[in-house]
Image (tube, rainbow, N blue to C red):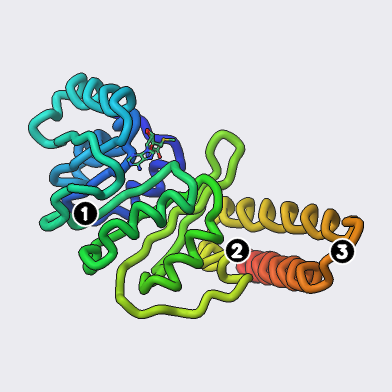
Amino acid sequence: MQHLDKRLSVIAGLFTPGGRGIDVGTDHGYLAVALVQGGKAQSMLATDVNPGPLQSARNCIAENGLTDRIDTRLADGLEGLPLSGFTDIIIAGMGGQLISSILSQRVGELAGKNLLLQPMTQAPALRQWLCENGFSILLERCAVAAGKAYTVIQARFTGEKTDCSPLFALVGRTPEDGGEDAGVYLQTLLSREQKRLKGLKAAASPDEAEIRQSEELVAGLKEILARREKEKGASV
Ligand SMILES: C[S@@+](CC[C@H](N)C(=O)[O-])C[C@H]1O[C@@H](n2cnc3c(N)ncnc32)[C@H](O)[C@@H]1O
């Protein structure tokens, strides 16, 4: 059985049971293989823009005897891919801006699909783009793998634009994830924002508006973390 680390396991857990998925930027192909092997996906299309990673995926698929269930394609994002008939689209392990630029290639054709997005960086930019471009963030699940905290965003295209406050852009729906890994994710965000605030205050000519916004984010994060602690205490 193909092993998945916690980050990839969380994505697999949000996949539509019995669905057909596209794994954009598959690299090693582990996720596509595990989804089919584990019976979660009926079939997969694994793609990559680079021939080397795509070859690794092809090797992994062949070694696991799954060439009849997992197709592969050299493609830049969603460009030229057949989207109809696919229930799920996974775009994981890339920067948030790259993920949004891939989604923007085919926005109109994404309605009804389960979108599983896992930004390695720039998650706030991705959440903001989703809100501004008619996508609804249904939920987020966090995972700590190799000492780093990640979020997996489950989204759907609705066509309705929504407001995205700076705090929502920063945390998204991770506060609704009651797991320990979400606590680590939120604590990491707080430490990073506190460090940024310190830098803003120490600047030669401090930007007062930016300082105020950063202070609000720090306060918002502290409040979220305090609420989690209180809820944890109440449930013991
Ligand atoms: C860090 S790996 C992530 C692999 C896997 N999705 C994961 O989450 O473990 C990023 C992969 O995305 C591929 N990639 C980058 N830009 C892409 C694009 N525009 N379209 C398809 N694949 C892309 C890279 O070649 C690389 O194999």
Quadrant housing the N terminus:
top left
At 40% from the left edge and 78% from the top edge, which residue is drawn?
A: 161
Give the x, y percent position of residue 30. Answer: 32, 32
Q: Which residue position is annotated with label 1?
A: 17
Q: Which residue position is annotated with label 3?
A: 206
Give the x, y percent position of residue 85. Answer: 11, 56
At 29% from the left edge and 36% from the top edge, which residue is drawn?
A: 48
Please tell me in which quadrant of the rendered image residue 36 appears.
Answer: top left
State which tag comes first along the sequence, 3 or 1: 1
Query: Is residue 165 in view from this perspective?
Result: yes
Residue in front for this viewpoint, 187 or 23: 23
The answer for how far apart the CA atoms under marks 3 and 1 are is 52 Å
For badge 2, the amino acid type reads Leu
For badge 3, the amino acid type reads Pro
> Which of labels 2 and 3 is toward the front?
3
For badge 1, the amino acid type reads Pro
Give the x, y percent position of residue 171. Answer: 58, 64
Q: Are marks 2 and 1 in contact (CB under 8 Å)?
A: no
The answer for how far apart the CA atoms under marks 2 and 3 are is 22 Å
Please tell me in which quadrant of the rendered image residue 49 appears.
Answer: top left
Q: Is residue 136 above or below residue 64?
A: below
> Which of labels 3 and 1 is toward the front?
3
At 88% from the left edge and 56% from the top edge, which residue is drawn?
A: 203
